[in-house]
Image (cartoon, rainbow, N blue to C red):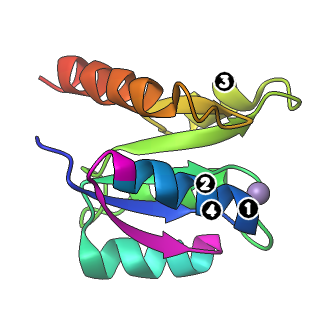
Amino acid sequence: MEVKKILVVEDNELNMKLLLHLLMVGKYMVSKAGSAEEGLELARQDQPDLILMDVQLPGMSGLDATRIIKSDPSMKEIPVIALTSFAMQGDEQKAREVGCDGYITKPISTRTFLQELNTCIEQYRMSSC
Ligand code: MN
């Protein structure tokens, strides 16, 4: 599995800008959604290679969206990396429980983000083969 196309689901505009910038530096193709509902629609249509999913979203949460993705045959093979908040204890465990394949803790670090993403992708590769 090569990861080229990434769908970012994030409601915070500053975080979204930062993520888009970093992912472009990393030479990924990016699509973006500001809500879980929009993200689900794009995931179905575009079949991205990976989804970066903010946990806290207006309306449906990122965890509920991941639960839907992982129970839908047309999307369940897409790895989902949760963007969890350092301040929200237990987010990581909840993310695993609903089927997230990894997580990156916010605040996003411009210095280490791409490395963290790579680590998640490597771990996903090892666990899925
Ligand atoms: Mn958010």
Residue contact between numbered discs 2 and 4, judged by CB atoms under 8 Å: yes
Q: Which mark is residue 93?
A: 3
Of discs 3 and 2, which sits in the foreground?
A: 2
Rendered position, 63 above or below 116: below
Type of amino acid under label 3: Gln
Type of amino acid under label 1: Leu
Separation (CA) of disc 2 from disc 4: 5 Å
Return the x and y of residue 107 as percentages of the image width and height: 74, 36
Q: Which mark is residue 18?
A: 2
Return the x and y of residue 9 as percentages of the image width and height: 56, 63
Separation (CA) of disc 1 from disc 4: 5 Å
For marks 3 and 2 on the same chain, the one whose residue lies earlier in the sequence:
2
Could you classify mark 1 by the number of other residues whose Cα lies within 10 Å: few (under 14), some (14-19), or many (20 or more)? Answer: few
Could you classify mark 2 by the number of other residues whose Cα lies within 10 Å: few (under 14), some (14-19), or many (20 or more)? Answer: some
Q: Is residue 91 visible?
A: yes
Identity of the residue drawn at 59% across and 78% down: 37
For marks 3 and 4 on the same chain, the one whose residue lies earlier in the sequence:
4
Q: Which residue is mark 1?
A: 14
User: What is the secondary structure assignment of the residue under circle 3?
Assistant: helix
Could you classify mark 4 by the number of other residues whose Cα lies within 10 Å: few (under 14), some (14-19), or many (20 or more)? Answer: some
Identity of the residue drawn at 40% across and 78% down: 42
